[in-house]
Amino acid sequence: IEINNFFSNEVKGGFDKLERLYALLLIELQKGRVIEIYIKGYTSQLASGTYNVNLSKRRIVSVKNYLDRVGVGTLKAYINSNQLKIIDVPFGEAQSKEKVKMDRRSSIYSVEASRERRVEIIEVK
């Protein structure tokens, strides 16, 4: 039940927020504004620091790919012209919670571990 609630509420809720952000971005970009989005990627501590930084970069790329393709690519021209800049902030495991770090099973299968495997839009300028 806990994992189902996590996906139904938190994961879907995050995606819904991303869709709302897309709509707002499009409005502001059409007005001629230059926008910078800072996206932070997280991981747990199951692998090495280098691997985790690269993994967090791949997670950020998934958001970039969404923004590049959403609405049949309506943001693509803004991204290509640098009117919409997406800045990576790969974080790796540096902010993982201690509880998740220590217990290997929990580090893979728990809701807490799932929360560590995420991306966040931390700032929009």
Image (cartoon, helix red, strand yellow):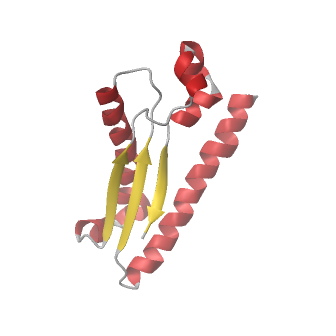
**Relative vertical location of residue 114 with respect to residue 10 in this rendering, above or below:** above
Compared with 93, 118 (above or below) is below
Which residue appears at 40% of the width and 62% of the height? 37
Q: Residue 40's x, y, as percent?
A: 42, 48
Q: Is residue 113 left or right of residue 90?
A: right
User: In the figure, residue 86 lies in which quadrant?
Assistant: bottom left
Q: Is residue 53 left or right of residue 103?
A: left
Quadrant containing the N terminus is top right
x then y, percent, for residue 77: 28, 70
Residue 93 lies, in percent from the top left, at 43, 32
Splitting the image into 4 quarters, where does residue 69 fall? bottom left
Using the image, determine if residue 72 lies above or below residue 35: above
Number of labels in the image equals: 0
Give the residue drawn at x 36%, y 53%.
64
Q: Quadrant of the C terminus?
A: bottom left
| Residue at figure coordinates x 50%, y 40% from the top left | 118
Q: Is residue 66 visible?
A: no
